[in-house]
Image (tube, rainbow, N blue to C red):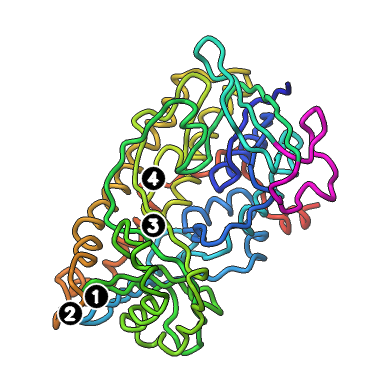
Amino acid sequence: MSETGCVVVGGGPAGMVLGLLLARAGVRVTVLEKHSDFLRDFRGDTVHASTLTLLDELGLSEEFEKLHRRLVDQITVQLDAGAVPLKLRWLPGPHKHIALVPQWDFLEMLASAAEREPSFTLRRNAEVTGLLTEGGRVVGVRYRDRGTDGDGQPGDPATEHAPATGHEPTTEHELRAALTVACDGRGSTVRDAAGLRPREFGVPMDVWWFRLPRKESDPIGAVGRFSTGHVAVMLDRGDYWQCAYLIRKGSDSRLRAAGVQLLRSEFAGLVPWTEDRMHAITSWDDVKLLNVSLNRLRRWSSDGLLLIGDAAHAMSPVGGVGINLAVADAVAAARIVAPALRAGRVSPGQLRRVQRRRWWPTAVIQGGQRLAHRFVLGRKLEEDPGARRLATRLPLPMRVLRRFPVLSTIPAFLVAIGPLPEHAPGWARRRPESTRSAAE
């Protein structure tokens, strides 16, 4: 059995940011990631303005700029009656855009920064299977891994990050910690082991994700297309479009049975300028399903245990705010619990402070998503595309935004920054590498 100050379950954006911040506070922290790498297709890739500001504060902006990224400073809403651009150039702060970057590159960058701190450990291929409890308090986790020695330390460096085949021998371990933090997503193993059940909010849709080639003559930025019975979002990734096509909740199997040509024809009908490249979708293997859920725990903690990010509140893809909300949770958690962890124990009251800090921005954002589900997306998907009626006039809110473009700052702020952006505590801030080198 080994020990650490804080064990973070899950190496996603929340887990890696929390691990980095706690390590910079001098806390011994171990992040357990069940996969050998961060490569997962169609994970959230949007890094919003508030998170970009956080990276500045952490001294990571130069490293981030080296990643393959695409900056988006305009979102175009296309309706049958016309298009309305929503510009981000009026956002407050230094970043008047959203960055699109492969999540695996973003996470590797955070992992590299954290591993420069002597108190940080990242264990890959480490799948948590349960919680350790004593007297009703969570005191750590059980996990299994492959490629480690008997003490639970990484084994051969040449094989540690090799893809798993499913036949590798596994080893069971226990890891004790003053605090366990669940950052293991909407299907959280830790949440289930703790017996916590989130409140579910109904959603009207699921999402098909796929890629289409992009041409220089295409629109720039992000495009949202709304029509009778159809909704799509296209994210400009430079040489390709990352496309989201919304379908009615639970209809995936029935629609796939009709053949992939169904998607090709419906999407080309919705976005005619993509018709010449729909052949890029060769089979249903090119189309990934996102089973959309929207939920929130009533209680995010118990003695010795804290849940943040999707483990505490699964977000809808509306607005693409999931990553940034999870990162904000991590920053708030680190600021509140780091001093207590340095002292050796975190009280239940301190963990409740994290929820009190992050509950209302989460509720506000989820409330907006629920309204969008009910009054926009749900209604569009319920309309009969066979009886398509082209609107001849933009809705009043769109007409107002077209006439007074500066008002687009309001929705842009809610999406790109959010109702309660979090900033790095002073002990976690660093100057960029070039500035440090020049000073030396």
Figure label count: 4
**In contact (CB < 8 Å): disc 4 and disc 1:** no
Residue labelled with disc 1: 227
In the image, which residues are magenta? 145-168
Q: Amino acid at mark 1?
A: Ser
Residue labelled with disc 3: 317
**In contact (CB < 8 Å): disc 1 and disc 3:** no
Q: Residues within 10 Å of mark 1 (few under 14, many from 20)?
A: many
**In contact (CB < 8 Å): disc 2 and disc 4:** no
Q: Amino acid at mark 2?
A: Arg
Q: Amino acid at mark 3?
A: Pro
Say which label, 2 or 3, has the lower sequence index. 3
Tell us which disc is closer to us: 2 or 4.
2
Q: Secondary structure at mark 4?
A: loop
Residue labelled with disc 2: 388
- In three-dimensional space, the C-alpha distance between marks 1 and 3, rounded to whole angstroms, equals 19 Å
- In three-dimensional space, the C-alpha distance between marks 2 and 4, rounded to whole angstroms, equals 41 Å
Residue labelled with disc 4: 420
Tell us which disc is closer to us: 2 or 1.
2
**In contact (CB < 8 Å): disc 2 and disc 3:** no
Position of residue 159 relative to residue 339, above or below, is below
**In contact (CB < 8 Å): disc 2 and disc 1:** yes
Q: Residues within 10 Å of mark 2 (few under 14, many from 20)?
A: few
